Amino acid sequence: MSSSTPFWNLVVAGGGPAGFMAAITAAEAGLDRVLLLESTPEPLGKVRISGGGRCNVTHACWDPRELVGHYPRGGRALRGPFSRFASGDAVAWFDERGLELVEEADGRLFPRSNRSSSVIQTLREAAGRAGVVVQTHTALQRAEALPAGGFALALRCGDDAPSLQCQRLVLATGSHPSGRRLAQALGHGLVPPVPSLFTLAFRPNPLLVLAGVSQDPVGLDLELEDPLPGSAGRAAHTAGLPRRFRQQGPVLITHWGLSGPATLRLTAFAARALHHGGYHATLRLDWSGGRSQAELEQLFALCRQEQARRQLSNARPWPQLSRRLWLHLLDQQGADPELRWADWPRRQERALIAALRSSCYAVAGRGPFGEEFVTAGGVPLGEVNLATMESRQVAGLHLVGELLDVDGVTGGFNFQHCWTSGWLAGQAVAAARGH
Ligand SMILES: Cc1cc2nc3c(=O)[nH]c(=O)nc-3n(C[C@H](O)[C@H](O)[C@H](O)COP(=O)(O)OP(=O)(O)OC[C@H]3O[C@@H](n4cnc5c(N)ncnc54)[C@H](O)[C@@H]3O)c2cc1C
């Protein structure tokens, strides 16, 4: 490396939300010569497409103890980081930089404009004001930790392969394989990446006629199947993973199977076990809204009494039960929807109550991804100091965002981890400069 090699106090590799937060925080705290590298022509690409183009920035979940419950990977270990910078801090951070976030009924927070471009503009303006140099079309290819401290970096920039040196390096490359390779080359381990936050496919789909129906709340009880002969190595239980997962909440029936918030939450928590099990499982759905057998029997007895002369098709046992779902369940039991409640055979009623409480479907694979898609896996959390996001392996190296083995359920939690880890890294880098 020649003495003319450019020198930066901080290089951030990856122009996503975690990288921007780290660079801005360090520069705003007084660090100069901060360079942010982005391999594509435009930084913050995922922010642009996030939340259906609206960007679900974070979630109105203010208590770090509660917040950690939304991270299938990360969980309790994130209590420390969130106690320093959580959702409320993110809301204030954006507000101080001119971006107001608005809470929706389900707790998700979006920019008032409802456009992800406002979030991008806020981050880019804050980076510009703080003096962060953003270089696009430039990928970090290799990083070598120097014996005397700092890093020698090899870049790829079109046909050029420039090099530079920096005192500290933040890897913020998201789920991109190049960032994982860089982390591994620097001595880090890797939890193998698998998809999270996907929908479930039934093949064939016994609920096809109900495509478009949503129901809330629905209980989901997923059980991974016993290993097929010859596939024992892939089975979840042989990998020491849980085999049973439960969730409750809104679901949406689709052409291929099941989607909706509760399904995405279920697949996030079951992501690794489902992967090991080849995405084959049994799913029991409780359509009854959590009612007990006795409550349902009472409700049906009341219908027989009060709606005795009405046809089954026109009188559902409770108004929130989708009419299409009710008709489908009647059809499944061979019940004539034209029958009046008073004339309905008890035997069919009992079977219908049983179907409401537990209907069984065979999961045969992953469906398309929901609006949000993240990767489970990455650099193990135990390999970083969670107060500074600094590597325990390599001094001066920080790892943030989705590159780490952290992922949240849908609802703004994935960005929140980016804001938190980026902010902690930026603070630590700026503080280290003074020593
Ligand atoms: C369709 C979709 C919608 C989503 N919606 C939401 C949502 O509404 N709310 C939410 O919380 N989460 C959402 N997510 C998840 C969220 O986008 C990610 O968790 C988040 O973007 C991860 O941020 P990051 O900074 O770690 O990585 P990224 O956003 O992936 O950024 C990493 C950047 O690094 C660049 N890069 C990679 N390798 C190199 C290299 N070697 N050198 C230089 N640059 C490199 C990449 O080009 C990329 O720009 C969504 C995801 C998807 C796919």
Image: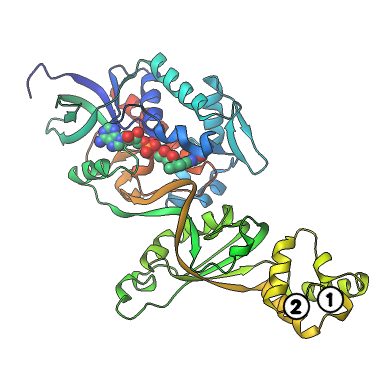
Using the image as rendered, state which of residue 248 and residue 360 is in the foreground.
360
Q: Which residue is mark 1?
A: 339
Q: Position of residue 143 (x, y in %)?
A: 18, 35
- Mark 1 residue crowding within 10 angstroms, few (<14) / some (14–19) / many (20+): some
Does 173 sit above or below residue 28?
Answer: below
- Mark 2 residue crowding within 10 angstroms, few (<14) / some (14–19) / many (20+): some
Image quarter in which the C terminus is found: top left
Image quadrant in which you'd find residue 424: top left
Does 314 sit above or below residue 90?
Answer: below
Q: Position of residue 32 (x, y in %)?
A: 30, 16
Does 42 sit above or below residue 398?
Answer: above
The amino acid marked with disc number 1 is: Leu
Q: Is mark 2 within 8 Å of ligand 1?
A: no
Q: The residue tagged with tag 1: helix, strand or loop?
A: loop
Q: Which residue is mark 2?
A: 335
Residue shown at the point (10%, 16%) measured from the top left: 4
Does 309 sit above or below residue 261?
Answer: below
Q: Position of residue 278 (x, y in %)?
A: 38, 67
Residue 24 lies left or right of residue 9; in this view the side is right
Residue 418 lies left or right of residue 67; in this view the side is left
